[in-house]
Amino acid sequence: MEILRGFKDILPTDIAKWHRLENIARDVLSSFGFKEIRTPILEKTSVFARGVGEATDIVEKEMYTFLDKSNESVTLRPEGTAGVVRSYIDNHLENLPYKKLYYIGPMFRYERPQKGRLRQFHQIGVEVFGISNPSIDAEIVYMDMFMLKKLGIENLRVEINNIGCDRCRPKYINQLKDYFTSHKDKLCEDCKRRLDKNPLRILDCKNKNCKAISKDAPKITEFACDNCKTHYKSVKEKLTLLNIDFIENPHLVRGLDYYTKFVFEIITDKLGAQGTVSAGGRYDGLIEQLGGKETPGIGFASGCERLIELMEEENKKQFDYYIANLDSDDYAMKIALKLIESTNKRVYIEYEKRSLKSMMKKADKMNVSFVIIVGENEKNNNTVVVKDMANSTQEEYNLKTFLDNEVKRWL
Ligand code: ATP
Ligand code: MG
């Protein structure tokens, strides 16, 4: 049997890195006052069609959409924001005293699988509701960079742009349309289609020719209204205050339609074409668009697989104790349970009948810290033989003395 194309198992050999990523993310996000929210992986299709935008690549061709058994159109979530906003409205979360939320979990997009691009991938994302103050825009970029630093990921570039709002963007889009129409014959098939429906998306096309044409396209800077200009300027000042270096990229647009005013990406050169590790921005119209009250919003999402790729190998020990059980199941279990209860450490009991030599080999492969050898003799004398794998020393102890020492070791 084969796994689906673009899907990947996360194996026990890699899990330590995933745990480290998730733990650090949770720590950082909660220190900045964020609370986790877990929304369903499957939603009504309209949540994403209306939330992400009908004319985006995601909605047009990347969604896993199907009819359930009662003929309702449902979709595996391609991104996190629309579902969180749906939940925010459904559950009246505007009544919560805090409105900073985060999520961690799988997303699904029917894309062409390649390095750094999967059909099931994971995101860590945040959303802030109800704050229009530009300080929060700067704070979440800072928090994102802080999280990446804690993960040991460096050499990143922050790109930012002002993407305008409903009032000023239409004028810009018209200009873009004129510009790209004059280069229509050189655009790829997708972009020819985008020209009518959503010319802004052409700026995000990964095709070489389209990219070259985009270089000289008009910039939003000239069209932004005063409100968007003031907000964007203020975000830049605050980023400078927080010592965040950034590059202004006037052609930075995001893959989703809901963004307004401030958008950003955090990019590495180490992953080739799929170099964006985190991306986000402000979405002041989205909550209203999905049926809620007029509420400003801002957020970002980081791609976990890309972060994992950039994180250093985990060389920490995988297990603390391996109980080399020589035909003394009950005694081995008694010791293991005492260790688990009193030290809270990771204990692996061997129940397979093996020679001591083969058990030592296995313990070595499993990268354990201590091997505890128990057989008939140890059981009769109430002792254990303990091998410290770090320096290959071995010693026999009275069981109670050993357990007391271990409790102290991990204090
Ligand atoms: P890209 O330009 O790489 O397609 P996007 O604009 O579609 O990205 P977002 O929807 O903003 O990206 O998602 C945020 C982050 O999630 C991306 O920066 C990336 O790290 C990750 N991501 C998005 N799509 C995938 C995918 N198919 N496989 C792995 N990671 C992904
Ligand atoms: Mg994409």
Image (cartoon, rainbow, N blue to C red):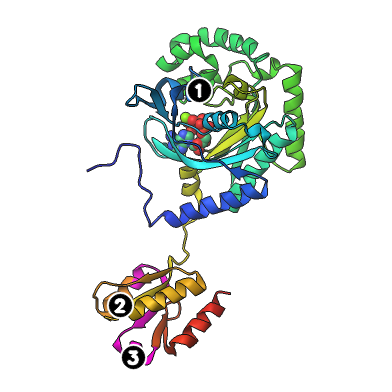
Q: Nearer the viewer, residue 340 or 262?
A: 340
Q: Secondary structure at mark 3?
A: helix
Disc 2/disc 1 C-alpha distance (Å): 66 Å
For marks 2 and 1 on the same chain, the one whose residue lies earlier in the sequence: 1
What residue type is disc 3 on?
A: Asn
- Of all residues shown, which one is farthest toward the left? 1
Location of mark 1 (residue): 211
Location of mark 2 (residue): 329
Q: Nearer the viewer, residue 113 or 181?
A: 113
Instruction: Give residue 175's mark.
Output: none
Q: Circles 3 and 1: CB distance less than 8 Å?
A: no
Q: Which residues are magenta?
A: 363-382
- Of all residues shown, which one is farthest toward the bottom? 381
For marks 3 and 2 on the same chain, the one whose residue lies earlier in the sequence: 2
Q: Is mark 1 within 8 Å of ligand 1?
A: no
Give me the residue at 25% from left, 72% from top.
352
What residue type is disc 1 on?
A: Lys
